[in-house]
């Protein structure tokens, strides 16, 4: 699932930016047939780091009429070679939610300042590790209209920060995901209810972790597998969600 470059209207570019002294390199995509301001959507990558998958999702969002920016949480050139390295990289940020939020905010700042973006209409979405990250961005109080997490972790060491959430939250998860346990879901729901957050959880029967990622394979018994139906349905759910919050 590489970047879509066939349509002449689709403008894509890499963007170098910083979080403090750390150099990051994200990916911007938008339809350049119009110079009208439009909603901006931040995309956060899965645990392997920013690559073709998240870039493709940014392209898809651009084709829907949004300005999409795929953020880089790990740093320019820092990408996992395998699952073991991905676990180490993602684990570092899971252990430092302040840094995770700061890296996401750095990406949101790039998106917000782009001339075609309506800074009053912002959202964030993420996959797996990225799903956890956009939830933490919401908990930081970022000015987002909505947040969508695809098969992302829901836990946080700072549930009290849900009081800062300004966004509506949409959780899209595999009903049989072994990595996001029922206890984690229950704790998340309590967190959202206690903070009076507008949230919704959609579960896809038979789907496990990474259900939107073709590279995850087709063996659900491993806990990670692609599910074409859940992928299609979750994308449609996301489209309807964005249409509602950006009315």
Image: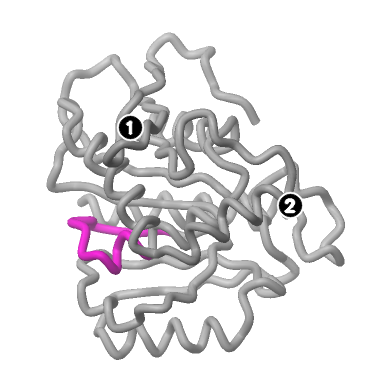
Q: Position of residue 224 (x, y in %)?
A: 75, 59
Task: Return the disc, 2 or 1, that comes first in the chain's sequence.
Answer: 1
Q: Position of residue 82 (x, y in %)?
A: 74, 43
Q: Quadrant of residue 49?
A: top right
User: What residue is disc 1 on?
Assistant: 65
Q: Classify residue 50 as left or right of residue 101.
A: right
| Residue drawn 66% across the image and 74% down it | 175
Q: Is residue 182 left or right of residue 55?
A: right
The answer to whether residue 195 is magenta is no
Residue furthest out toward the front: 21
Gap in angstroms between the C-alphas marked 2 and 1: 37 Å
User: Is residue 219 found left or right of 49 in the rendered image?
Assistant: right
Q: Is residue 86 above or below residue 138?
A: above
Dot 1, how many residues are within 10 Å of its Cα: few (below 14), some (14-19), or many (20+)? some
User: Is residue 145 in the magenta section?
Assistant: yes
Query: Which mark identifies residue 246?
Result: none
In the image, the segment drawn in magenta is 136-148
Q: Is residue 235 above or below residue 111?
A: below
- The spot of residue 196 in percent (x, y) is 25, 84
Q: Residue at x 68, y 54 (%)?
A: 229
Name the element at disc 2. Answer: helix
* Mark drawn on residue 84: 2
Residue 50 rendering spot, x and y as whole percentages: 53, 37
**Which quadrant: the N terminus?**
top right
Vertical order, 184 against 15 (above or below): below
Name the one closer to the observer, 206 or 112: 112
């Amino acid at each position: 699932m590489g970047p879509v470059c066939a349509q002449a209207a689709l403008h894509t570019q890499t963007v170098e930016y910083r979080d403090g002294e750390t150099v990051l390199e994200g990916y911007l995509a938008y339809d350049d047939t119009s110079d009208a301001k439009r909603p901006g959507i931040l995309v956060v990558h899965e645990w392997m780091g920013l690559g073709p998958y998240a870039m493709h999702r940014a392209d898809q969002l651009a084709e829907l009429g949004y300005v999409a920016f795929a953020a880089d949480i790990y740093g320019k050139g820092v990408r996992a070679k395998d699952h073991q390295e991905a676990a180490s990289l993602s684990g570092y940020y899971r252990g430092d939610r302040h840094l995770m939020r700061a890296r996401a905010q750095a990406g949101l700042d790039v998106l917000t300042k782009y001339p075609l973006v309506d800074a009053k209409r912002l959202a964030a979405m993420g996959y797996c590790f990225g799903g956890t990250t956009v939830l933490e961005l919401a908990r930081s109080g970022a000015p987002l209209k909505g947040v969508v997490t695809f098969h992302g972790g829901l836990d946080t060491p700072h549930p009290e920060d849900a009081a800062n959430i300004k966004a509506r939250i949409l959780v899209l998860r595999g009903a049989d995901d072994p990595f996001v346990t029922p206890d984690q879901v229950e704790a998340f729901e309590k967190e959202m209810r206690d903070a009076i957050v507008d949230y919704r959880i959609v579960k896809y029967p038979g789907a496990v972790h990474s259900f939107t990622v073709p590279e995850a394979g087709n063996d659900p018994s491993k806990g990670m597998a692609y599910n074409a139906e859940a992928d299609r349905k979750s994308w449609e759910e996301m489209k309807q969600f964005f249409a509602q919050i950006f009315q």
